[in-house]
């Protein structure tokens, strides 16, 4: 795939080749990033239509605000659903955002949400250019039928949701004072389905020329549909086109940062909440602990003058680690009981692959709790009643499950125990710091 804008900036920093989502599905992963916690503490193990993170847990923006930063998120939030802000005795969504210490929020509907949000800013924009009916009809058709239908969007590149996010981000940046520190999350939607890359991106990649990964398994199953090789090639081509299109949108924001004059002193982190299987092991979507789903792209480009130890790191890291990274960079302090570790010591070369760092992931998927451990070359996970163990250095496509091999029995047991120990050690303790009444009486703090 071609991502010239992302590649150019990534080369100025460090790429993380062993980065994992804390939960390979959207809402829990985004909530975990916001809280610095994992599903076993937030209680959100999967997507839901009724959810809002507990304000007392969601401390990312609050910690950055305390460090003196203006805070903002533009695009997809997906950690607030329905009217659940009411459960925390808040008057409206704006009061909820204020409680999170967010100075500015531009929550733009995702593509599949567009037909059901006719009064949103994006819908008003589409109506102003005469595209509302065409776009809403196209997206509703995809959602009711095949959500992975590879078909060019009814929008041009300048009209699509992705560019709307870029334009809103640029408009916000242009209004911010240069002398006030800014923490901004710009959140695009794709390459998540629908596969609706606009032209010329929809036809940028030739389906017949695409290489087939060795872990592809036909037929591919998703939502009651079965896809063969020809269909996969068309879907994959649109998927890659959408990635290149998003790269174009992100590049617009990079250009705006450069024109703003503070490019050199800006820390940039590129991440995703999860991946998609896209045919690997016969699956199409997310929710799995296979690399395509739980693995995420991640790179850190520090401000100019900060030493970068190497262009790439194989240290296992978590999406949650972005929380501690930005707070450290801001000179702030991470709220207590966060399960997050800064990436900056790795960028500086203070932590290497020999450190033995372990990362974890969790999910409630298809009515079952599942978990994953990654350490060194190996990954262990339990999902849908089955254990898996893979040597990712020797078997990057996860074709050979080593769980039944006697030579690996002790390692599998150890990695399973690592998860259980970590699970016990990272429970939220709301009694932390409590002093008995008698002690408080002696101290005069009763």
Image (cartoon, grey):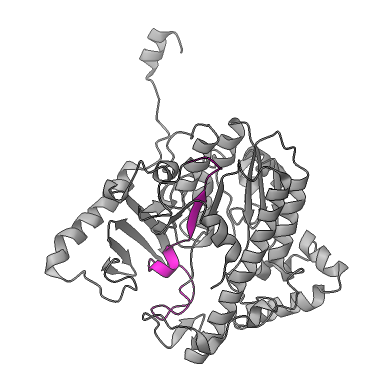
Q: Which residues are magenta?
A: 277-306
Q: Is residue 346 left or right of residue 87?
A: left
Q: How many numbered discs sit on the rendered protein?
A: 0
Image coordinates of residue 142 in percent, x first then y, are 65, 80
Q: Residue at x 54, y 42 (%)?
A: 58
293 inside magenta stretch: yes
Whether residue 32 is in magenta: the answer is no
Pick the residue in front: 31 or 199. Answer: 199
Q: Please tell me which residue is depicted at 46% across the width and 49% down the height of the picture.
A: 320
Instruction: Answer with left or right where residue 78 lies relative to residue 38.
Output: right
Residue 319: x, y in percent? Answer: 46, 52
Question: In percent of the image, x 77 and y 69: which residue is there?
Answer: 159
* Most common SS among magenta residues: loop
Residue 324 x %, y %: 47, 41
Q: Is residue 359 above or below residue 390?
A: above
Against 101, is 77 above or below?
Answer: below
> 88 or 74: which is nearer to us?
74
> Against 321, is 404 above or below?
below
């Amino acid at each position: 795939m071609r991502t010239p804008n992302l590649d150019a900036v990534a080369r100025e920093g460090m790429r993380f080749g062993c980065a994992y989502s804390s939960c390979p599905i959207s809402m829990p992963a985004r909530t975990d990033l916001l809280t610095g916690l994992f599903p076993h503490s937030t209680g959100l193990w999967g997507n839901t239509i009724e959810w809002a993170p507990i304000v007392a847990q969601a401390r990312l923006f609050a910690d950055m605000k305390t460090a003196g930063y203006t805070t903002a998120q533009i695009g997809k939030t997906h950690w607030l659903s329905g009217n659940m802000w009411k459960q925390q005795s808040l008057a409206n969504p704006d009061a909820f955002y204020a409680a999170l210490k967010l100075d500015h929020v531009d929550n733009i509907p995702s593509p599949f949400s567009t037909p059901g949000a006719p009064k949103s800013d994006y819908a008003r924009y589409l109506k102003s250019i005469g595209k509302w009916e065409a776009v809403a009809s196209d997206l509703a058709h995809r959602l009711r039928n095949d959500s992975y239908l590879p078909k060019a969007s009814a929008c041009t590149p300048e009209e699509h949701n992705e560019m709307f996010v870029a334009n809103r981000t640029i408009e916000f940046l242009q209004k911010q004072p240069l002398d006030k520190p800014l923490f901004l999350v710009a959140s695009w939607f794709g390459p998540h389905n629908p596969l609706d890359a606009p032209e010329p991106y929809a036809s940028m990649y030739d389906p017949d020329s695409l290489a087939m990964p060795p872990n592809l398994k036909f037929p591919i199953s998703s939502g009651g549909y079965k896809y063969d090789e020809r269909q996969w090639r068309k879907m994959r081509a649109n998927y890659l086109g959408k990635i290149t299109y998003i790269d174009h949108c992100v590049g617009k924001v990079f250009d705006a940062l450069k024109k703003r004059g503070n490019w050199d002193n800006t820390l940039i982190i590129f991440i995703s909440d999860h991946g998609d299987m896209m045919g690997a092991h016969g699956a199409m979507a997310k929710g799995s602990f296979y690399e395509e789903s739980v693995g995420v792209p991640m790179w850190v480009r520090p401000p100019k003058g900060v030493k970068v130890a190497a262009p790439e790191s194989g240290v296992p890291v978590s999406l949650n680690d972005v929380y501690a990274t930005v707070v450290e960079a801001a000179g702030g302090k991470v709220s207590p009981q966060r399960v997050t570790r800064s990436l900056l010591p790795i960028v500086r070369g203070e932590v290497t692959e020999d450190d033995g760092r372990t990362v974890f992931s969790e999910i409630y998927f298809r009515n079952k709790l599942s978990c994953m451990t990654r350490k060194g070359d190996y990954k262990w996970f339990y999902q849908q009643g089955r254990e898996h163990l893979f040597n990712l250095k020797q078997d990057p496509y996860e074709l050979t499950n080593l769980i039944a091999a006697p030579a690996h029995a002790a390692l599998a047991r150890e990695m399973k125990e690592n998860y259980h120990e970590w699970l016990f050690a990272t429970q939220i303790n709301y009694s932390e710091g409590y002093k008995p009444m008698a002690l408080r009486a002696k101290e005069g703090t009763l």
